[in-house]
Structures are given as C-alpha cells and as structure tokens.
Amino acid sequence: MRSIRSIVGNRETVTVDPFMSIVDAARLMSTRQIGAVPVVDGERLAGIFTERDLMARVVAEGRDPQTTPISDAMSTELVVADIAESCETCLSRMQQARVRHLLVLDHGRLGGIVSLRDLLAADLDDKAEAITLLNAYVHYIPADLSKIKT
C-alpha cells in the first residue's frame, strides 16, 4: 500500500490558532467542508479541533461558542503519523485510537491531515487495482499457446 504522502501531497492544510473563537472555527470548517482542523501556535502544533470536540466540549457543556477560544475545547492528546508511513499502518492506528482524523508530520512539522474517508478511499483504489491486475493475469492467453490445436 502507498504512503500517506500520496494523499497529503500538495493539498492545502487549513489550520487555526488557539485564540480563534469556536464559532469562527466552526464557520471555517463548515465553509471548507472539513471535520477537523489542526491548531497551530506559531510554528508549534498545539492540538486538533474536531466536530466531536465541538459537541462534547462546547455544546454539551453549555459554553458560549462566541467567546470560548479553541484552546479551551481542542484535543491535545494527538494521534500522529509520519508522512512516509503506509496508509494501511495509519488506518490501523486510527482504528485503535478510535479517531477519524490523523495529523501527518513531515520531519517533525505539520505536513497535513488525513481523514478516515481519505484512507478508506486509498484502500479501495489499491484493492480495485489489484483486482484488475489479477483479472488480467487469470484471463491472459499467451500468443503462441493460442495457435496450438487440440
């Protein structure tokens, strides 16, 4: 299976800072149609803010999203992967940690973020390619064998 570098590639990683309000982060996530954003304090990866954090730490606790900063609701126990790791390894890590988003590090710095959907799509593509190759192998008839009379 390929590395997550192929998924992260050159796509833009949307980030927020810890002082942004929850409502501004939620609007950004809604506009970009993403379920999580890395929280970056200067050059340092400080956490991740997800839809689950919004529900559990803001809505369920009755906090005001207008005045609550991301730093009060973000997750700080991060599940990360190296950009060179395989999609299969990352998928397994996400399943074990029961998370839907994985922060990707490139030489110790934020390189991107992948979702469970991204990894499942890559896995499906790999399996479809393997099936195509296996079908071609099973149905292959060498040119010189086709001329043999029985």
Image (spheres, rainbow, N blue to C red):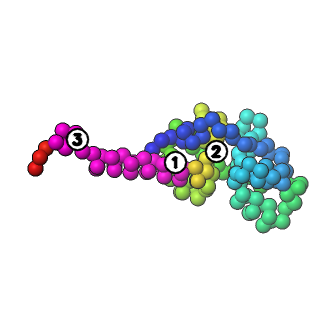
Which residue is painted at 58% across and 49% down in the image?
118
- In the displayed structure, 98 sits above or below 3; it is below
Tell me if 49 is positioned left or right of 84 in this view. Answer: right
Query: Would residue 71 appear left or right of 3 to someone viewing this image?
Result: right
Q: Is residue 4 visible?
A: yes
Labels 2 and 1: the sequence-earlier one = 2
Answer above or below: position of 36 versus 84.
Answer: below
Position above or below: 98 against 90: below
- Numbered badge on residue 148: none
Q: Secondary structure at mark 3?
A: loop
Name the residue type under label 2.
Answer: Ile
Q: Which residues are magenta?
A: 119-147
Q: Residue at x 79, y 45 (%)?
A: 18
- Please tell me which residue is depicted at 77% across the width and 50% down the height of the picture: 31
State the image coordinates of residue 80 (x, y, percent, origin top left): 60, 45
The residue at which mark 3 appears reads as 142
Mark 2, mark 1: which one is toward the viewer? Answer: 1
Q: Position of residue 42 (x, y in %)?
A: 77, 35
Which residue matches tag 1?
Answer: 122
Q: Which is more toward the observer, 33 or 69? A: 33
Mark 3 / mark 2, whichever is N-terminal = 2
Determine crowd level at label 2: few under 14, some 14-19, many 20+ residues with C-alpha closer than 10 A.
many
Q: Is residue 93 visible?
A: no
| Viewport quadrant of the N terminus | top left
Q: Main secondary structure of the magenta part?
A: helix
Q: Quadrant of residue 106?
A: top right
Tell me, yes or no, whether the two marked residues, 1 and 3, touch with CB atoms within 8 Å. no
* In front: label 3 or label 2: 3
Circle 1: residue type:
Ala
Image check: 131 left or right of 104?
left
| Rendered image quadrant of residue 63 | bottom right
Q: Which residue is mark 2?
A: 113
